[in-house]
Amino acid sequence: MRRRQVLVVGSGGREHALVQALVASPSVQQVYVSPGNAGMAADAIVLELNWKPRSPDFAMTISKLRELNIDLVVIGPEQALADAVSDALRQQGFLVFGPSAEAAQLEASKIYAKEFMIEAGVPTARHFVVESVAQTMECARHFQPPYVLKADGLAAGKGVLIEKSLEGLREAAERLFEKRELGEAGSRALLEEFSPGWEMSHLIITDGDRHLTLPAAQDHKRLRDADEGPNTGGMGVVAPIALPPNLSERLEREVVLPSLALMRKRGFLFRGVLFIGVMVTESGPSVLEFNVRFGDPETQALLPLLDGDWFEVFDAVARGEFSKKFSWRPDCYTAVVVMAADGYPENVVKGQTIAALDDQGRHSAGRILHAGTARDPQGRWVTSGGRVLNAIGEGQSLNEALQKAYRVVDAVQWPGARVRRDIGAKQI
Ligand code: AMP
Ligand code: GLY
């Protein structure tokens, strides 16, 4: 069989993990990544291409992909999906792992997603749609504190405001509706009842008909240890996590199957990942959000757990022929510890030197993925994004995986790096 040319779209740690998973496939000849980052150059060819299908330069992207004989495109980030990159590529005859823009509304609009969950009968917190400060305060009378206010549109992790008091809620509403801090993304919002519980990331891969459930993962969203500090894109993940009896079965029956059924009824083209953010409450699972892509950093923990070839999975899903049964490696645990920039998430400091990395961006202490790095004119590795590196550990127990990941963290530290020291602690 001819070996394949594969392109990954995106630039973070998630995409670096996807690149490495594809490089490992015997079916793959060459992996390309765009826009990528400097740290991926050791594994893939990094391409600068335009990813806005409405821009005139997008035609050049198509010609380049034709010239390179790209067989499969795997799309990482939600923005590209919301911008209809998958649809534009499919129209040009490419095989794509990533849902249509229509389906991406499940992530791009929280109000759309909420209405979808309700129609599907999926358990989720009670809500009101609000678009002014006065309306927010009026609806808040129906709930107890803390109050959850969610901007409707994509806000790069900044769209959810959780406030302990009515005064705090008023200020949050003013920021969305009057100061317009999130622009159009915050012109409408959901006011939602707070669900107490613990969170998990429930991901499935689907071609719309069949699906494969990934091992359960747990992210750590707050910046500091003990879940304190501001929300971030995610500071670390462990997988698989132990689930209470019946939870998997309830997620399948109450959440996954009705959601897939409604997608089919609406005629969505969904070939990719549905990532369900779940709060496990006393009465069972409650859906916090839908994402239409792999999680970051969940992906970095989940990809090593497959007992098989990721190219085969992505290719089958992209063709709509996902039938083969895939399975997960027994007795294998993974841990990801995010190393973030000084000042993350609010005031990211860029350009700090990461002295410990070798010329390939690696270190003998263990596995590293690059999320936001660049090279300065002298060729030194420097920070260039909020989340900078991911330390990855794998082992036969969660403890072993965590020890390996922290060994890497300790070896590549740079001054000001922000790292949580308690990743996985709740599971141990
Ligand atoms: P989301 O982007 O919707 O996942 O929200 C970001 C974070 O806010 C979640 O990971 C939760 O920690 C928290 N959150 C969102 N909605 C709720 C809710 N209804 N109750 C409690 N916490 C929530
Ligand atoms: N780790 C959370 C996310 O990818 O949205």
Image (cartoon, rainbow, N blue to C red):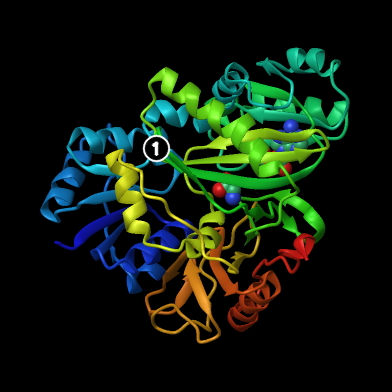
- Residue 270 versus residue 418 in the image, above or below: above
Can the viewer see residue 97? yes
Residue at (36, 52) in percent of width and height: 313
The kind of residue tagged 1 is Leu
Q: Nearer the viewer, residue 389 or 350?
A: 389
- Residue 358 versus residue 157 in the image, above or below: below
The picture quadrant where one finds residue 115 is top right
Furthest-left residue in view?
A: 67
215 sits left or right of 382 in the view? right
330 sits left or right of 90 in the view? right
The picture quadrant where one finds residue 423 is bottom right
- Residue 359 point in image, percent of width and height: 39, 83
Q: Mark 1 points at which residue?
A: 81
198 sits left or right of 341 in the view? right
Please identify the quadrant where the C terminus is shown.
bottom right
- Residue 131 versus residue 174 in the image, above or below: above
Residue at (71, 42) in percent of width and height: 246
Can the viewer see residue 55? no
Please identify the quadrant where the N terminus is shown.
bottom left
Q: Nearer the viewer, residue 355 or 253?
A: 253
- Residue 213 versus residue 305 in the image, above or below: above
- Residue 418 point in image, percent of width and height: 67, 66
